[in-house]
Amino acid sequence: MMTEPVRFGVIHGFGPFDPEGLVAGAQRAEALGFDLFNVADHLNGDRPTLEPWIALAFVAAATRRLSVVSNVLGLPYRSPAVTAKMAETLDRLSGGRLVLGIGSGGYDAEFSAFGLPERTPGEKVNALDEALHIIRGLWDEPEFTFAGRHYQTHAARIEPKPARRIPIWVGAYGPRALAVTGGLADGWVPSIGRLGLDRLVELRAAVVASLERAGRPVEEFTWATNLVLGPASTSSQDAGRGWRQLTGDSDAVAGQVAQIAAAGFTVINVAFPVADEIERFAAEVIPAVRARLAAA
């Protein structure tokens, strides 16, 4: 299934809360050869977090090569028109390094606590569809009017327009959301720790089908996934929010990651609850994965 070299990213925020270490962590990831740096979007809760736009701006200013990824924005937190402008600015100032990850918002309590809309599953998909139309419309059209049920724009415009086509990756799982992803997005970024590889392969086929129905080239679409690396000495346990960890020594982990990549996922984003595990992954796992894939 692979059509492009596998890339690796770091997911920030799974270890102890360390805002002062954000920039140093990103620079460390870049020096170790990672390709992407991801920040999640959980603004409400008892677990300390960083707001992703501000965090990614600091990361972009302190690095030169890393793509910066919102993984993924909770749609109810921000107007899609405002998100379109924020993305244009960050992409421009970072030299074209933004990946706009977005999702409909899976954890309802986060949004209701802030007095934001509570939507049914069907309404969430409709809102996501509308948001993607608005974001692309504002990026592509001189001015854009849109009359949706959840979002509207009225002869809206942003200037300057993006200097390139900013990639949009969607974190989605339901059948209708996967159809929207294949019809409008540039990539799909599910979390393998939530469902397992077999189920993700089934959902990937659904996205492929939606791409084909839309007449869009499958080979130009990005297939990413998120996973959590546990310490080599531990058994598989949830790392929070239903995430199951990949565990074992470096060879065992490399085998699991190579299997994920061979199934068609060419961007592997890794969370490191134990910060020092990033060194082992970079030095031992990534070369072993690439060697396995080259030999396949």
Image (tube, grey):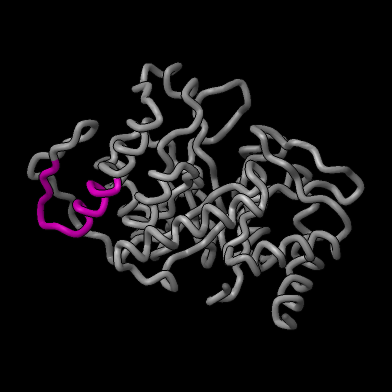
Task: Determine whether, in the image, residue 164 is placed left or right of residue 110.
Answer: left
40, 17: nearer the viewer: 40
Residue 20, above or below 285: above
Snapshot quadrant of residue 182? bottom left
Residue 257, above or below 104: below
Q: Quadrant of the N terminus?
A: bottom right
Q: Is residue 253 magenta?
A: no
Segment colored magenta: 132-146
Q: How many marks?
A: 0
Snapshot quadrant of residue 164? bottom left
Q: Is residue 141 magenta?
A: yes
Q: Residue furthest right?
A: 233
Task: Determine whether, in the image, residue 188 is placed left or right of residue 198.
Answer: left
Q: Residue at x 32, y 46 (%)?
A: 86
Q: Quadrant of the C terminus?
A: bottom right
Q: Is residue 145 visible?
A: yes
Q: Residue furthest bottom?
A: 295
143, 267: nearer the viewer: 267
Residue 13, above or below 150: below
Task: Determine whether, in the image, residue 153 is placed left or right of residue 295.
Answer: left
| Percent coordinates x, y for residue 40 in the rendering | 53, 41
Q: Is residue 53 visible?
A: no
Snapshot quadrant of residue 286? bottom right
Task: Determine whether, in the image, residue 220 is placed left or right of residue 47.
Answer: left
64, 120: nearer the viewer: 120
Q: Residue at x 59, y 47 (%)?
A: 191
| Percent coordinates x, y for residue 129 in the rendering | 30, 44
231, 16: nearer the viewer: 231
| Percent coordinates x, y for residue 209 in the rendering | 41, 61
The main secondary structure of the magenta stretch is helix
| Percent coordinates x, y for residue 219 in the rendering | 44, 73
